[in-house]
Amino acid sequence: MNITGAFYALAAFAIFSTHDVVIKFLGGHYTPFQIIFFSTLFSFPLVMFMLIRDRNPGHLRPVHPWWTLFRTLAAMINTVAAFYAFSVLPLAQVYALIFATPLVITILSIPMLGEKVGFHRWAAVVLGLIGVMVVLRPGGTELTLGHAAALSCALFGAFASVVVRKVGREERTEVLMLYPLIANFIVMGTAMSFFYHPLPLLDLGGVATVSLLGFTGGVVLILAYRASEAAIVAPMQYSQIIWATIYGYFIFGESVDRATVLGAGIIILSGLYIVFRESRGGHSENTPVLRTRSRASTAMSFRISPFVRREKLR
């Protein structure tokens, strides 16, 4: 068993966590629309650099226009929700709620992919949802728009991932990557015009850093999946809760309460069990969680799988 990919993945998710810290800094002064617009603007050349390596002939008309539209909308909502949640909630709490994404993927894969989910995975889903309730503590704490945003990030990120699993082999990578970028540029640019605040050079550099970190994290994650199996790489995403605790405490003065620790632990255990059941074979025809390799809440729609698959075909 090659565990090299685990170390690459740990590095990738450390980069992504730093990406989220910069978002939290910027989110205290600017709306998500403005941050996403400029992040997308800086991301275009980086993503184009990846796409020009594809020598296959084709066009940018989607094979499945409706699914492409739904995924584009879901990706936009996911990004806005993530950026807003990181701006207003403690980092550890946001990660704990976003970690529910594998649970939602498992549920959505039933109607959308025809996936058969047995008792064990259903039990893991129910346990994970209990963990979400522990983090939210309904009645014991004030639920805010930030909590709704974090949950929306998990929901719409999961939906976008399942759509890719459904049509990804028929749609070109360029279509699935460029359409959300273009939509972000147009929609966020329009929304930003109502809330625009001038960006000093330092803050503009911060936005450029968000794009660079998102791109770099994606590249390192590609290296991780090339080096090891998905069952080894995927669980490394939960290391972000450690970075959230460190960054939150030393940079933002945040403390992690017991409910968040307990709830996050339950959600992580349920997610790990779902990954374990899918990786054993015979329990999942589509392995939708293990096939979800991209990190949904970055400013760009960076799909990891095509670049991993392309390397393996060489």
Image: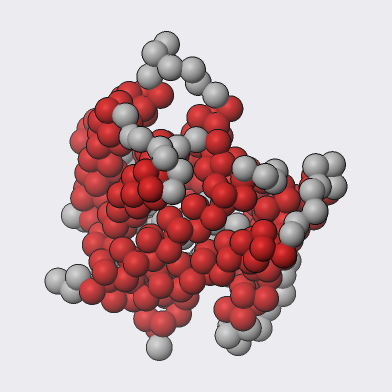
Relative to 171, 187 lies left or right:
right
Residue 245's place in the image compared with 139, above or below, is below
- Quadrant of image for the N terminus: bottom left
Most extreme residue toward the top is 139
- Residue 117 x/y as whole percent: 30, 38
- Quadrant of image for the C terminus: bottom left
Residue 139's place in the image compared with 115, above or below, is above
Most extreme residue toward the left is 1
Inspect this view and state whether residue 82 appears. Answer: no
The image's colouring method is secondary structure
Residue 4 lies in what quarter of the image? bottom left
Closer to the camera in the image, 203 or 46: 203
Closer to the camera in the image, 277 or 15: 15
Relative to 82, 36 lies left or right:
right
Point 57% across, 49% down: residue: 25
Inspect this view and state whether residue 52 appears. Answer: yes
- Residue 264 x/y as whole percent: 30, 36
Point 39% across, 13% down: residue: 140
Point 25% across, 37% down: residue: 265
- Residue 256 x/y as whole percent: 33, 34
Closer to the camera in the image, 107 or 79: 79
Point 43% across, 55% down: residue: 17
- Residue 236 x/y as whole percent: 29, 57
The number of callouts visible is: 0
Residue 289's place in the image compared with 63, above or below, is above
